[in-house]
Image (cartoon, rainbow, N blue to C red):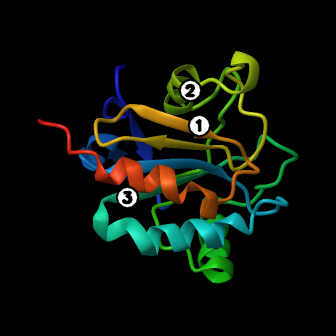
Amino acid sequence: MTSFYDFSATSIDGHTHTLADYRGHVVLVVNTASACGFTPQLEGLQQLHQRYADRGLVILGFPCNQFGQQDKGSNAEIANFCQRNYGVTFPMMSKVDVNGAHAHPLFTWLKAQAPGILGTEMIKWNFTKFLLGRDGRVLQRFAPRDTPQSLGTAIETALQAPAAKA
């Protein structure tokens, strides 16, 4: 697998999507959780979605229950929580593992492309974010403490880059 577009994921409502559907977009992939101290970042992510979607930003939320069991609910419960409490309208995917033997292949690839502090490929906590360029390659990894509001400059830069040729 050489780019984001080589993967597929299942939406929170159970439909499988090839990520090639997002070709030419800037994508922000985030592992989310409903009961985490960082959960209010969902509001900031929704604001980014509203601000930049028409310019080509796609935010993909991937719920994960691997950190403190902070997303125990079903996919339907998670979707309802995110929409009801934070007005989330950006695409949410089915709950996944991001570390370990059962990690979703996308996250295995993302971690290899953009290791964390000291080169570790592990995701340390909920709300780790990966920004991908229009060519499907990882531009930057952001820590859970990096708020959505702090990503504006990186997103603007990525959006200004020309779309990749087919």
Residue type at mark 2: give it: Ala
How far is mark 1 from mark 2, CA to CA? Answer: 6 Å
Marker disc for residue 114: 2
Reading the image, the residue beneath label 3 is 57
Q: Secondary structure at mark 3?
A: strand
Residue type at mark 3: give it: Leu
User: Quick one: label 3 or label 2, which is nearer the N terminus?
Assistant: 3
**Horizontal and vertical percent for residue 46?**
54, 71
Q: Is residue 11 visible?
A: no
Residue type at mark 1: give it: Arg
- Of all residues, the one furthest to the right in this rendering is 68
Discs 1, 2 touching: Cβ within 8 Å: yes
Q: Secondary structure at mark 1?
A: strand
As drawn, is 149 to the left or to the right of 100? left
Reading the image, the residue beneath label 1 is 141
As drawn, is 154 to the left or to the right of 100? left
